[in-house]
Amino acid sequence: MAIVFLQPQAHQVLPEYHVGTASQSCTSPGIAQCFAIAGWTQAGMLCTHVSPGATKADIEATFDYLLQEGGANVQRWYVVGPFTDHFAVAKARWRSVEDIKKTFKKAFGNKNAEHWILDVTTERNQFSWGIDIQAEHEGAMPAAWFSYRQAGKLTVAWTELKLHRFVRF
């Protein structure tokens, strides 16, 4: 599948295989086995929605776009998704947190960047199909804020994912 780069927007919506930048929020809709990734900078976020069906070429193209958009200068990266479900997919390129870590190191090599993960398997399993994940940029605050809701339920309020639940990798 070809990776699609979306032009910068204040509020970005990123389906699977999409990469973009946002000054205020990134939403990854329909997370069942995927990962939502957001990289925090003072100006905004670099974001993507990685499918367990992504090929090696897809992952490389995704991270090439993130690098072109300033990924080497990101201060904090966040990976959010149902790890149990993603890692269970036999053809997934990422089968462990260590695989994700290797991809980030190869792509950016930024030893000063922080890398944070959050397994939302429990939140995803609350619903029959999946969740939408949203990252919000809070200006000069050195962190992104995350929330989720039942996939496709646009009228349902977002539920905050507490930052203290993130684990550094």
Image (tube, rainbow, N blue to C red):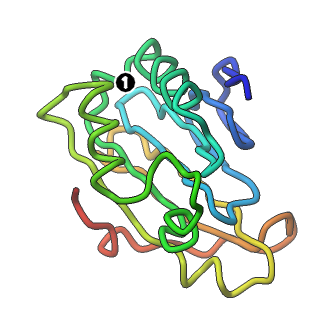
Nearer the observer, 157 or 59 = 59
Q: Position of residue 58 (x, y in %)?
A: 59, 29
Q: Position of residue 168 (x, y in %)?
A: 22, 60
Answer few, some or many: residues within 10 Å of disc 1's Cα (few below 14, many 20 plus, some between 14 and 19).
Answer: many
Q: Position of residue 86 (x, y in %)?
A: 55, 63
Query: Label 1 is placed on what type of residue?
Result: Gly
Q: Can you say whether 126 is above or below 7 in the image? A: below
Residue corresponding to mark 1: 71
Nearer the observer, 114 or 88 = 88
Helix, strand or loop at label 1? It is: helix
Quarter of the figure with the N terminus: top right
* Residue at image coords 48%, 34%: 45
Q: Can you say whether 164 is above or below 43 in the image? A: below
* Residue at image coords 68%, 32%: 18
Q: Quadrant of residue 31?
A: bottom right
Nearer the observer, 73 or 58 = 58
